[in-house]
Image (cartoon, rainbow, N blue to C red):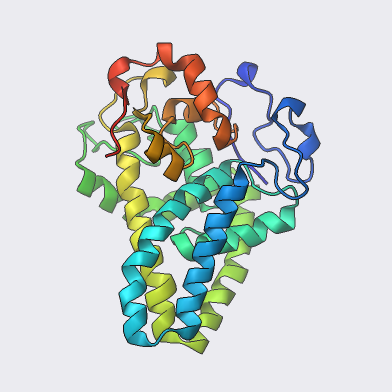
Amino acid sequence: MNAAIELDPSEFSISPTQSDARPDARPKVATETRRWLRYKADRRSVTLTSVMFAAHAGVFFFAPTWIAVLFVIPLAVGSMFISAINHHHQHFNTFRLAWMNRIYDLALSLQTGIAPFAWVLHHNLGHHVNYLNQRPHPEPDESKWTRPDGSQMGRIEYTIDLLLNHQLDIIRVGRRYPKYLRAFLLMKIPLYALIGFALYLNPINTFLVILLPGFITLVHTSWVTYGHHAGIYSTDHYEASWNCVNPLFNYLSCNLGYHTAHHKRPGVHWSLLPKYHDEIKDRIPPEQIDNKFF
């Protein structure tokens, strides 16, 4: 169940809500021959997610409290890269089968502190639709970086504002998209059941291995999204995002640096973003493309 909003449908033919059960409806040129994965490139992202999940599980089940404390930061840092994978997965589900995607949702959520379908509602159906609308616009971006008077927030202010308001925004957007709100609420059941069972087994390690690293990752995700658009008041999609073409950054983030390309074609698989960026980079202001890692 994807929810990738295409800003220019004439350029790309994926339906905004393409069903997991109908992968053959996508253009054949975009199809990788793989039994479970839609794209062969996701071998890397699934492997990293699985390794990090195993690391969380290993520390949870086998580490005494003092060792679990030492692993809080390493687990959180690893989960920061999983957050980018989670973002891409919510735009373009990784597996061909819906049930595999839902299990993957849970593995991603337990590591990143972001519940299944939260990205879909807040980011895909909220931010991607409204990111050109900054306050005082009556329907501002869900990841808004302006104050009510239209002035630019600082990064810390933005991070706190996003953390405090994102759950309310998810419900607000979900009222317009009840199909996805229902999926968001239903997926809370297995997610909370897993966390509840973990609390029953070992409440201290649950906090140190799942809840605290997840919260740190959520804070980091809010922090870094400020740098995607803040300070750009353009209403032109080609001029509304900051782009990073640093090879290491894009390897670690699965091409999240090609942000204009992502916003123009949010339904495109992450592995295709560099090619599309090359096609449109002449339309992006040069000062909005840099090669710096930070």
Query: Which quadrant holds residue 104?
Result: bottom right
Front-most of residues 282 and 291: 291
Q: Is residue 211 above or below residue 127?
A: below
Q: Is residue 171 left or right of residue 146?
A: right
Q: Please give the name of the residue rendered at 64% of the width and 43% of the height, measured from the top-left corner.
A: 2
Front-most of residues 57 and 202: 57
Residue 55 is situated, as x and y percent measured from the top left of the image, at 48, 70
Q: Is residue 8 left or right of residue 172?
A: right
Q: Is residue 167 above or below residue 290?
A: below
* Residue 263 visible at all: yes
Residue 262 is situated, as x and y percent measured from the top left of the image, at 49, 30
Residue 185 is situated, as x and y percent measured from the top left of the image, at 59, 61
Q: Is residue 81 left or right of residue 178?
A: left
Count of number-bearing discs: 0
Front-most of residues 38 and 226: 38
Task: Name the quadrant of the C terminus.
Answer: top left
Q: Is residue 43 left or right of residue 110?
A: right
Q: Please give the name of the residue rendered at 52% of the width and 56% of the height, measured from the top-left corner.
A: 48
**Residue that lies at the very extreme toward the top in this rendered image:** 282
Q: Is residue 68 above or below residue 42?
A: below
Q: Please give the name of the residue rendered at 35% of the width and 35% of the height, measured from the top-left corner.
A: 228
Q: Is residue 254 above or below residue 231?
A: below
Q: Please give the name of the residue rendered at 44% of the width and 30% of the height, measured from the top-left corner.
A: 258
* Residue 172 visible at all: no
Residue 60 is situated, as x and y percent measured from the top left of the image, at 47, 80
